[in-house]
Image (cartoon, coloured by chain):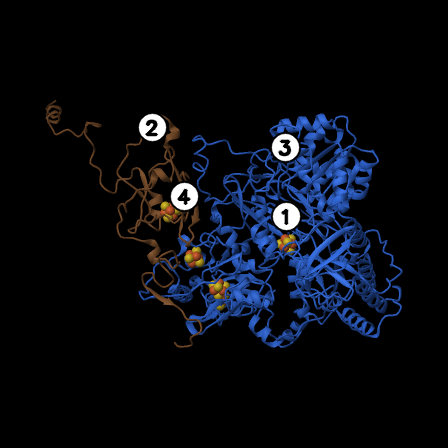
Chain colours: A brown, B blue
Amino acid sequence: MGLTFLHAFHKRDTIQYPEEKAKLSTRWRGRIVLTRDPDKGERCVGCYLCAAACPVDCISLQSTEDENGRRYPDFFRINFSRCIFCGFCEEACPTYAIQLIPDFEMAEYNRQNLVYEKEDLLIDGQGKYPGYNYYKVAGMAIGGKDKGEGINENPPVNVKSLLP
Amino acid sequence: MPTIYIDNVPYEVKAGKNLLEACLSLGKDLPYFCWHPAMGSVGACRQCAVKVFKDETDTKGRLIMSCMEPVRDQMRLSIEEPEAKEFRKHVIEWLMTNHPHDCAVCDEGGSCHLQDMTVMTGHAYRRFQFKKRTYQNQYLGPFLNHEMNRCIQCYRCVRYYKDYAGGKDLDVFGAHNHVYFGRAEDGVLESEFSGNLAEVCPTGVFTDKTLKQHYTRKWDLTMAPSICHHCSLGCNITAGERYGSLRQIVNRYNGEVNGYFLCDRGRFGYEFVNSPARVKKALVRSKLPEAVSRQEALQEVTAQLKNARLIGIGSPRASLESNFALKALVGEDNFHSGVSDTDYDLVNMSLKILQSSPARTFSMREVEKADAVFILGEDLINTAPRLGLAVRQSVRLQPMETVMQASIPYWQDAAARELVQDQHGPLFMATLTATKLDEIATAAVHASPDTISRLGFAVANLISAESPEVPHLPEEEQALAEQIAQALVHAKRPLIISGCSSGSEAVLEATANLTAALHAQNPETGIVLTVPECNSMGLAMLGGHRLDSAFAAIHNNYADAVIILENNLHRCADKAEVDRFLGKAKQVIVLDHLHHATSEKAHIVLPAGAFSEADGTLVNNEGRAQRFYQVYPTAEDIQESWRWLSQIGQALHVPLMNQWENLDDVTHALIEIEPRFRSLEAIAPPAGFRIAGQKVPRETHRFSGRTAMFAHHSVSEPKPPEDPDAPLSYTMEGYRGQPPSPITPFFWAPGWNSMQSVNKYQDEVGGHLRYGDPGVRLIEPGQNGTHRYYHEAPEDFQPLKDHLLVLPLPHIFGSEELSCFSPGIAERAPKPYVALSPQDAQMYGLEAGEILSFTLNHQTFRLPVKLFPELPLGTAGLPRGLPDVPFAEVPAWAIILKQEPAWKNQPHTIS
Ligand code: SF4
Ligand code: SF4
Ligand code: SF4
Ligand code: SF4
Ligand code: FES
């Protein structure tokens, strides 16, 4: 009895949602976004790894390429009515493009509205991992970065030279 | 059989192999790069190291490259020994120091041998902190993408391209750690087999450019076993689909047929399936709008046909089942073959020869083992490309005997090639004009079909007096005939190759005589005949009347309605005649997957499934029936032609067709009515076949996006479509072990994601598939022992004044109808032209590029001249089947018209 009274005067654990918002840590796994690299380019290169990692197979996309060879997703769809917010996609992503963010307020009356397309997913910022730019470390040439201009790369080999 | 001990476990292995092959055949996981089962070992990559021990007491052992070491009895080796493992891990780490951080954007990813081997060796973390080497890429044409940074210098590409496939324009350049694999300068890769580089290269340096246009990872494809529809050889392919479009064709190993390689027409010709010219909806021309639903179309067809007198025209590019369904619907007397007159005669004759010839028709594997080859009238690289590649291997056989005598194992590729240099075994070619195989021929002559036939007859006469003598043979040809006869008689497995592409019965007669003569002396003799289309042989076996008689039936009012099955008649008869026929018929119903000149004129068009949307059987030139399976459920109202036809048959109450529900029903009816197709029973497991109660999945276990790919239409996932025709499911659920070979949708094994996983599906590496290579042979030699010698060699060819004998010139890119709808193939196809020998051109006062006008079968042609120095005098070459060159029955004499002044720029063709 005493204990019950004691607890009655303790600080409340219950949060008065929605008036009061929960404090979520940055690594909280909520709504999924697609981020951009520091140069504002789309980070996602359409590698399909997130889709393969997804245990409920709720990610589907089609990669395509711009005229300079940069890959990006033509469409990118997540069916949030299936997503279990496990974060495997984020772990699988080699470019830090796909990220789970601390937002869970995505309830809908109509299940169809839980199907998010690229327009709904793509944000303007870099999300949790600022600074990373996949194309700077990959070997492919894209617009604005030719062969040998990436980080830690030598200039392209002169095949005709016999010098060591 | 020698016994070897691998990690102290004894195994029986085949003698004469190397250790790597032996280990892989036993199912061991031993990494490798430079070794290839079709190309042998060079020991370039150092990846396949194992430890061998002197005897049981030896604990130190020594490291060796398993691909370079022959199997010896009582040999002891270890794959698992720590030092060997460490060594392999180091090798990969070195290879990876310069490898780009590209997997995410690399088309090889997910089916990459380098990825697989890296994981297998356990190299997981890059310690090398210095700068990476980079290269510029090259433009290599419409088929292949080049990304040189990814190269690991295994040399497989050049060994395949130059040594195996005889290519000239890919090489290795530069020195030390700067070596470069590519062309001397940017440009289209010339080899007709370049696409195989995408599979041969263990990394993403060479990748399929057509796949890149709609890139999909291997694990995301819905795949099914299929058969290439682009020539008569019937190479086995795996076709993959995603989001309703066909994405990629890869090789499907068949030990008897295509082995590890395809030609570029087969690999890149698939895009016609995604072409905008596809028929997707049933069209009833009398309605507005024309497009109607499947039901309406069927009702309309039934109404129109109820009281019609119906004939049917089949197709050499439609499946056996579809042709049979049409034959069943219209009745035997009203079924016509739908091929040109020349092709009709030649294919029927080929079939007759194969059935009565005492010699076996060789599979491509056997062709590779033939030690003397004589080719009559066939430009193989352009008519049956993969066979040309097989012939290229056969000429290595005789010189390899020196290699054996020097006790060098045959798989020691570098040593063997060093010893052989450019010696070739006997290969004789008699063709219309220069071909790409001439360079490896012992002797190559270029002549008119009659001259070729006479040479064949002469050789046959030298071997057996039963074959007639050839009168007035020039001395030169007599000498050549003697040389050829010598070579053939002394060979262990001589082979005669011929076919329909020279358009000459005389050539086939000579071939038949020659094979029979040779067979009387050597029962190992083989024969191979190529036919024009993927199912020409099947159609001929099914029987059918000439196209002419179909025309006559309509003109004589014997019939008033016609069903045309997957056929553009404008490609097999003169335009005027076809148009007159189509104009006269009251009802023209066309079933096809592409719009073309014939479907334009049809009253009703029904959308048929292309090869990737249909199940069926094709009979290749060898008489091998092979099943192809639907890859993905069809969109809209498309369905297999045989299904359309059986629905029509049921609506019209054709008794035979009443019970037809699925493919097996059609096949069974076929077997019952035509007993010569009896072996079809064994072609593949029936639709009801299950393993442990399960179907075989068309999708990999990693297939992604299942719950999202259609979510934009409706968030509730639809029930997966059923397949009534095959024991394959359209989903990822089902039996995960190795299915029977004819229904293997893709090759994959744990740890082996790339194509090289096929090792695990073979009885021994490079051998036959486990459970047998797919396909059943319907033609066996001399079944009825009816071979009779043809009695007369033709007269020699004589040029005619103001005339040229027009001969068909086949083109790998351009001559085949379907592949021309694929942009890459269309880009490689030649522009319309007429070929002349320089002397003839001079006589008519023409230079290359100027217009030659001539009439051929009442049609006038105006085509720019190309000079072919090897073309026989008095003949001209007309490219076969080019979309912009109107059909003309050839060989035929053309009347040369007075030439117009050169400055007048004429359109290419008129008709
Ligand atoms: S894993 Fe990342 S880069 Fe790859 S497709 Fe998914 S979001 Fe894009
Ligand atoms: S070649 Fe293989 S390992 Fe290299 S980037 Fe491509 S997928 Fe990755
Ligand atoms: S390009 Fe490919 S096949 Fe050729 S050496 Fe490099 S990795 Fe090997
Ligand atoms: S050789 Fe013929 S069957 Fe084989 S891949 Fe080429 S076109 Fe197809
Ligand atoms: S596979 Fe043995 S050294 Fe390359």
* Label pair 2/1, CB-CB below 8 angstroms: no
Q: Which circle marks residue B897 in the picture?
A: none
In this orientation, which residue lies closer to the viewer: B843 or B381?
Answer: B843
Answer whether residue B43 is visible to the viewer in this image: no
Label 4: which residue?
Answer: A51
Label 2: which residue?
Answer: A108
Density class for disc 3 (Cα within 10 Å; few <14, some 14-19, many ≥20) is many
Q: Is mark 3 within 8 Å of ligand 4?
A: no
Q: Which amino acid, mark 2?
A: Glu
- Alpha carbons under labels 3 and 4: distance apart: 39 Å
Look at the image and tell me in which quarter the N terminus of chain B lies: bottom right
Query: What is the chain identity of the residue bearing mark 2?
Result: A
* Label pair 1/4, CB-CB below 8 angstroms: no
- Alpha carbons under labels 2 and 1: distance apart: 49 Å
- Of marks 2 and 1, the one in the foreground: 1
Residue A9 x %, y %: 10, 26
Give the SS element for disc 2: loop
Is the residue at mark 1 from the same chain as the one at mark 3? yes
Label 3: which residue?
Answer: B283
Q: Which amino acid, mark 1?
A: Leu
- Residue B343 located left or right of residue A105: right
In this orientation, which residue lies closer to the viewer: B649 or B377?
Answer: B377
Answer whether residue B600 is visible to the viewer in this image: yes
Q: Is mark 4 within 8 Å of ligand 1?
A: yes
